[in-house]
Every structure is written in C-alpha cells, then in structure tokens.
Image: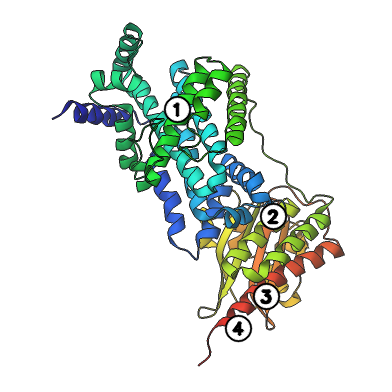
Amino acid sequence: MTKKKTVIDKLWKRMSVRGDVPSLQHSAEHIIRSLQDEQASVTDLTSLVLSDFAFSQKVLRLANSAMYRTMGGDVTTVSRAIMVLGVDTIEYLGLGLQLLNQFQSAAGSREDARGVIKRAQMAAEFTRTMTIAHGSHPSEEAVLCTLMFQLSRLLVVLYLEDEWARIQAKMAADPSLSESDACRQILGATLEEIAEEAALQWNLPSEIRNCMQAELPALDDSTPQSHGEWLGAVAALSANVATMMESHVSEEEIADFVLQYTENLALDPIVVQQALEQTQALGLAIDSEQEVPAASASEPEFDKPVDAAARLGTALVDIRAKAPSLVATSLTPWVVESIMNALNLKTGFMMLLHPESRRYVARFGFGPGIRERLSRFSFDAGFVPDIFHLVVTKKEPTLWLDVRKPSVSHRMPAWYTTEFPEARSVLLVPVHLQGKCIAMMCGSWGETPCSRELSLQETQALSALAGEISGSFERAMSARPSY
C-alpha cells in the first residue's frame, strides 16, 4: 500500500469514527436528485432552498446581483430566482454552502480550524465576485472548486492533528517549502490530491473532481486549454489571494500579483479590483463576527401585513408579464411562493385534482416540515360539508380567521386537524378551469391567528393569481396535438 493511500484511508476512517461531519455525500446527492426530474425541478428545488434560510438568502442575493437585474425587476421569490439563475447554478451554490455549513460545525471553537474556514470563505468570495461576468453556472463551479482546494486543508487540520503539526514545523524550518510540498513529504499526498479524493468520495460533479490538480498558469504560457484547467487556475489564484490577505501582505502587492493573470484567465481588471476590496471587507466582517457572540435566532412573527394588497398587486404584475412563457410546473410554485411572501404565511401547499382517483392530492409545499408530510395531504373530490368543499363550491379565495371556533371547527376535515393541530387561521385559494376546480392552495400563519379579514382588493388579487395558474393549464391543453 502506498503512503498516499495509507494516509487517505486513515483520514477517512477517522472521519467515519468521529462522526462529527454529517454525510456530505448524502447532502450532495439530495440536491442533485432534486434536479434529475425536469418536471419537478423547480418545485422540489424551491422547497429544498426555502428549508435553509442561509441558502435561500444567497440564492436571492445572486439573482438580484448586477448581472441579473437586467432581466427585469427585483427577484423576491426563490421560485423566480431558480428560473433566472437555472437549476445547475443552484446545484453548485447549494453544494458549496453545504461544504461550508458542515465544516463550520465540525470546526467548532478550534482556532486553527476556524482560520482555515475563514480563508475558504474569503477565497470563495473572491472567486465568485471576479468570475460572475462569465455566467452564474461557471462562476459557482469555480467557487465549489475553490472551496474543495481550501477545505482539503481543513480535513488534515481536523483529523490528522499530529501530521499537521509536523507539516507546520517543516515549513517553519524551511520557509522556501510550499505547503503542498510539505504535505507530500509528511503525508505522501498533496492537499490537491486529498481534495480530489474527497470530491470522489462525496460524489461531487466530475467537473470539480477533474480540476483539483490544476495550477496557476505560468505568466508566459497560453490561456488554459480546457474548462477544467480554467476552474483549477481560478481556484489556485483565489487560494493565493486568501493566503496573502491572511499574511497581511499589502493591498498593492496583492493587486499586482493578481493582475498578472487577468489576461490569461479572461478576467476584467476592474472587476478583479472590486473583488479584492469585497474579499478584504469579508475578512474584517468574519473577524468581527467571531469577536461578538451571535444572537440566537427567534421564531419569525407571522401575520397578514397591512400592505398585503399592494404586495399581492406587485406579484401579480410581475407574474402576468412572465406567465405566457412559462409552463404550469414552473409558474405554479412561483405563484404559491408569491402569495406566501405577500401574506407572510408560515406554510403553504398546492393540491391538484387527480382525475382518475377523484381526489385532491398535495403536489408541493413550502414551510417548516411540509415537504416531509405532503403525501398525507389529500381529500375526496366528492362533496362533504367541510371548508375545502365549501371553497370548491364558492369558487373564490376564503379566509377563516379562527378554525377553532365552534362555528368552524366542526367543518374542519380530520386529516387537516391531525396534520396542522396548531393552525388558527386558514386561507384557501381555488383554481378553476372550464368550470371545474382543478387545484387549491392552502396556507396558514401557524399557531398565530390572522388579525385581519381579506379585503376586497386582496381577494381580487388572489383570484387573479389563481387565474394565471388556470391560464397556464389552459395553454398546455391547447398546445396538445389533436388527432
């Protein structure tokens, strides 16, 4: 057995035994699985993104960056962000975030490990900012590649403590020795080789696995000859920048170093300078956060906002402008999420009529715990005097302010009270097509009762949003070939 294989086996065995790093492979496969069914990708991926607050904020921030704002208006929902950015971009963004989240948890309070995490965050920030003009997908690929370069060092710090101490001692004794060469001498494997093995173990995309060995191009060389070489070169450049910043090299020296590579790597010098400034600012912010204990996150308050009508109206204008070009499976989650945002709902799910079984079944939903329970949300289309069937008959959005009141509680179906025992106020929005209710959105503010009835303007906006869903189904029907 080679020294390289011995140390990699040792590393993976220690990771498995300690068990303090959650299975990144499971997380990666979960994200990738959500993308494999093209029809379900927007709804499934939206639900996945919304389940992680940090993830959703990064997605929205990227969709609203200068590069994408030209595509029309602010992006306020994850569903729309996914349509703007593309599912591939979200995949890489999600994988990168999983890397950082899971290793931050493993690093705990260890100062050396936290230092590596900081360097990884700075390198990733520099990569994303300087490459975004090439498109979000290659940019997020480069970010993930950058993180793998950085976090392979963290694996050694966390799980091969004695070897890491010897590596540091060897570098201190010989300042001309690079960190990678010192790793090769002590471990029998470079950090790049460990990163490549980690990418393979975690089943990361081949583009990431295949660029781990790339280096900065020589200044007199031609440009990278493949996408993988470019990814690796960008990651190597970012690693150098993060190291120089952590070593307190002057801003002028760092800028001079980076600008040597802008032509070879097709980078805009002005954008690179902006990236350097943003990365320096991030480093200062990270130091500040580590000095001040983070406040514990409190449960957000849910209630219908006073400007709900205006918010629904803004969403309706945006959706109407894009709806004709969208299929129902893309439009519907966007409408549902827009309604949830406008009304500040805690949960929301969409039920569709299944013609053969004559049952309404939940197809997707957003909010805490909804994804895991969807299969339990269904009811028979045959009339029963409960609130769901009453809305089917009434044909317009309806809000029950307190479903625990005796005048309403006996109208609540058992399946709903079982699944949502805490719910106080329930909103139902039916979707009709050719005189038949084909779908229904159900929303709730959770254990908080809604403080205000639906206004006429809000009811009309909700009906119009439901009409956009109906229109998308109608367009799909008319597009089917007739024989």
Q: Where is residue 194? Give x, y as percent.
A: 30, 31
Q: Is residue 131 visible?
A: yes
Left/right placement of residue 367 relative to residue 406 reads left
CA separation in Å, label 1 and label 3: 50 Å
Give the CA distance from mark 2 to mark 3. Answer: 20 Å
- Does residue 328 sit above or below 61 in this rendering? below
Q: Earlier in the sequence, mark 2 or mark 4?
A: 2
The residue beneath circle 3 is 471
Q: Secondary structure at mark 2?
A: helix
Residue for point 42% across, 44% down:
27
- Residue 45 place in picture, x, y as percent: 52, 54
Crowd class of label 2 (few under 14; some 14 to 19; many from 20; radius 10 Å)? many
Q: Is 370 drawn above or below residue 466 in the view shown?
A: above
User: Residue drawn at (60%, 30%), measured in percent from left and top?
Assistant: 273
Q: Earlier in the sequence, mark 1 or mark 4?
A: 1
Label drawn at residue 340: 2
Secondary structure category for the residue under label 1: helix
Depth check, mark 1 against mark 2: the one in front is 1
The residue shown at (48%, 49%) is: 91
Q: Which picture quadrant has residue 439?
A: bottom right
Residue at the farthest top position: 173
Image quarter of residue 213: top left
